[in-house]
Amino acid sequence: MTVVIAGPTGVGKSELAVRIAESADGEIVNFDSIQLYRRFDIGSAKPSPEVRARIPHHLFDVLDADQEFNAAEYARAARPIVDDIARRGKLPILVGGTFFYLRALLAGLPEMPARDAVLRTRLRKIVQPRLHRWLSRVDPQSGRSIAPGDRHRVERALEVWLISGRPISSWERPTNDAIAAVKIALSMDRQRLATILDERVEDMYRAGLIEETQSLLERYPESARPFSAIGYREAVAVIHGKMTTEEAMNETRRRTRAYAKRQMTWLRAERNVHWLDATDRDAAFAAALRLIEGES
């Protein structure tokens, strides 16, 4: 059995996953696309070294920022880890917020054209709003489901269309070899969550997000994918004098709230999801354990 802990950013997924792992002899497997990258710690809300020392954590700090990585590669990396955890008699607990990666792992991805470096270079020269308008014309379904600011997925969808002549949304997923999972999703009153998210943004800037970003820019090119992530893009703008810190914090708050809303929309469309109210963390933990024990 595999357990998924999902929900909008800031709702308490990581804390619940650690408590379950400690109680049910589990190990945590990350499906957050930014937490995969080394040194991108503050802006991704990566679990602290102390927390990761308590329970085995997998697929954190496994990539450098200038490495390309996509959902298919994530699934290929995560599947043997999940299988190995289960083979050792432990409970695999998938935790994160990049649900496209989660879907790739649990349900698989269609055999689509491989990445084309030359084509990607051409697409990178086009400004983001124009790229998304182009995608919306040639593949309306993907245009609706992919956020305008998610440049990596927009580029991939256009790349598949340009190479194959088919929208990425038309490719069929495999019907076998799926991973059965107990999917637990955390929810919270929207206004309460918004308050938590705003405080979280303030904490990140106070903890040194801009300084962390400055250090990362000395190692990696600004075009590296993680620099487009929420918080890092705004920190880069501050470093280049394009935003004040207050403007960056406000934009980070706005993007974080929008991201949480998209995550909830995605989860509500998923089937067989067990929803738990995260307001009372002890009650949510007890309910999650009952669900897991009921499936054992």
Image (spheres, rainbow, N blue to C red):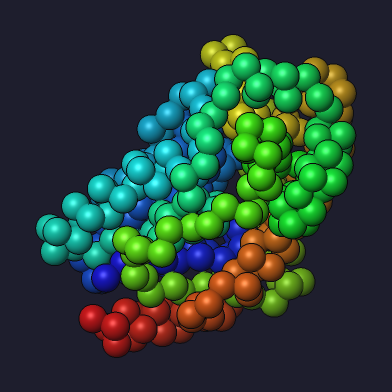
Foreground residue, 278 or 290? Answer: 290
Q: Is residue 128 visible?
A: yes
Q: Quadrant of residue 133?
A: top right
Please tell me whether residue 88 is drawn above or below residue 232 in the rendered image.
below
Residue at 52% x, 42% y is 112
Q: Quadrant of the N terminus?
A: bottom left
Q: Quadrant of the C terminus?
A: bottom left
Please tell me whether residue 61 is drawn above or below residue 197 in the rendered image.
above
The percent coordinates of residue 121 (x first, y second) are 67, 18
- Furthest-front residue in this view: 165
Q: Quadrant of residue 205?
A: top right
Residue at 41% x, 64% y is 175
Q: Number of marks in the image?
A: 0
Foreground residue, 176 or 5? Answer: 176
- Furthest-left residue in this view: 88
- Furthest-top residue in this view: 218
The percent coordinates of residue 216 (x first, y second) are 57, 20
The percent coordinates of residue 265 (x first, y second) are 69, 68
Please tell me whether residue 246 is drawn above or below residue 186 in the rendered image.
above
Residue at 36% x, 83% y is 291
Q: Is residue 17 left or right of residue 32?
A: left
Residue at 87% x, 34% y is 130
Q: Is residue 196 visible?
A: no
The percent coordinates of residue 155 (x first, y second) are 68, 34
Q: Is residue 51 left or right of residue 240?
A: left
